[in-house]
Every structure is written in structure tokens, then in C-alpha cells.
Amino acid sequence: MKVLHPVAGALALASILAFWLSTAFSEISGNMEMIRSVKLAIPWGLPLLIPALAFSGFSGFRLGGRWKHPAIVAKKKRMPVIALNGLLVLVPCALILRQLTLNGDFGATFYAVQALELCAGALNIVLLGMSFRDGLRLKRRIGA
Ligand code: HEM
């Protein structure tokens, strides 16, 4: 658990960061071919991201379920927000964007869903980053 918990956490953070950056980069470039391939590739990353996130949460609660340390209490509070935002907002957004891309429909709906996905993704990146930092602080691997 102690070994796999941070590995799963790092994997979850790295994959969502990669999805976010590749989306932002493709949108800024305006290259339709790149936008298409990014939007079609991301759903294939979900079978990696979802178990990594689920395992980070599960192992986190196994390791620290009863800890009263403020950093752990904060991690515990963040985790349901991360999970619900992921499952109820980010996964549906990724699947809707995939379908719109397959239909070649890059109209207002595509951009509204894309904007929502970037905002919700940024929120999860920040929350995962804070939990990562709190984990490292707890192990005194980085300073306060
Ligand atoms: C998905 C979000 C999370 C991420 C990215 C994350 C990341 C990390 C990292 C990087 C460490 C440092 C491990 C090391 O340096 O050896 C750590 C440790 C720890 N985390 Fe998390 N964590 C997450 C969620 C949670 C949750 C939800 C809890 C508690 C309910 C938790 C409890 C702990 C505990 C107790 C430790 C110390 C483990 C030990 O004593 O070895 N984590 N975490």
C-alpha cells in the first residue's frame, strides 16, 4: 500500500495533466487534425486514469482512514470531490466530445462541453496536486 499509493497518485495526476495539456495545446494550435486525434485518444486513456484514481483513494483511506493529521483530513475531504468531478463531469465530457468528433460536429455544443471539461479538469489537477504535495510533506520529502 505504502509503495503503490503514491505510484497510483502520480499516475492519475500525470495522465489527467497530459489530457489537459494535449487538449489545450491542440485547441491553441487550431489544427483540426490534432484536435480530432486528441479527442479520440483521451477516452482510451480512461481505463488507466480511472483505476489509478480509484486505487489512490482506496489505498489512501486504508493508510490514513483514522488519521487526525490536518493534511490527511484535507486529503480525505478532497477525494470525494475529485472522484465525483471525474466520474460525473470529466468522463461524460470526454465521451460526448469523442462522439461529437466522430460526427464531425465542431459547433457551439462541442466548444461548450470542451470549455466545461477544461475547467473541471483544471480543478481536478489542482486538487490532485494539493493531495500529492500533502503526501510528500507528510513523509517529509519536501519542506513545509
Ligand atoms: C488521489 C489523490 C492522492 C494523491 C495524488 C496522493 C499522493 C500521495 C503521495 C505522493 C504520498 C507520499 C508517499 C511517499 O512519499 O512515500 C502520499 C502519502 C500518503 N497519503 Fe496520499 N494521495 C492521495 C489521496 C490520499 C487519500 C484520500 C488519503 C487518506 C484518506 C491519503 C493518505 C495518505 C497517507 C496516510 C500517506 C502517508 C503514507 C505513509 O505513511 O507511507 N492519500 N500520498
Image: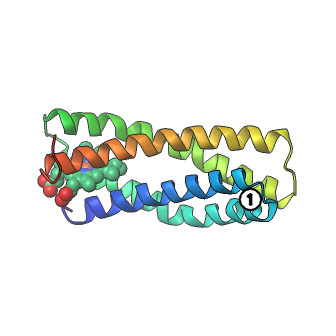
Residue plotted at (20% across, 43% down): 65
Image coordinates for residue 53, horizontal then vertical, percent: 41, 55
Residue plotted at (26% across, 34% down): 74
Image coordinates for residue 129, horizontal then vertical, percent: 36, 46
- As rendered, which of 91 and 21 lies closer to the eye? 21
Residue pointed to by mark 1: 35
The 10 Å Cα crowd at callout 1, few under 14, some 14 to 19, many 20 or more, is many
The residue furthest front is 29
The color scheme shown is rainbow
Q: Quadrant of the N terminus?
A: bottom left
Side of 53 where 107 appears, left or right: right
Q: Secondary structure at mark 1?
A: helix
Three-letter amino acid code at disc 1?
A: Ile
Q: Quadrant of the C terminus?
A: top left
- As rendered, which of 114 and 75 lies closer to the eye? 114
The relative height of residue 129 versus residue 32 in the rendered view (above or below) is: above
Instruction: Determine which quarter of the picture holds residue 101.
Output: bottom right
From this viewpoint, is residue 60 visible?
no
Side of 21 where 106 appears, left or right: right
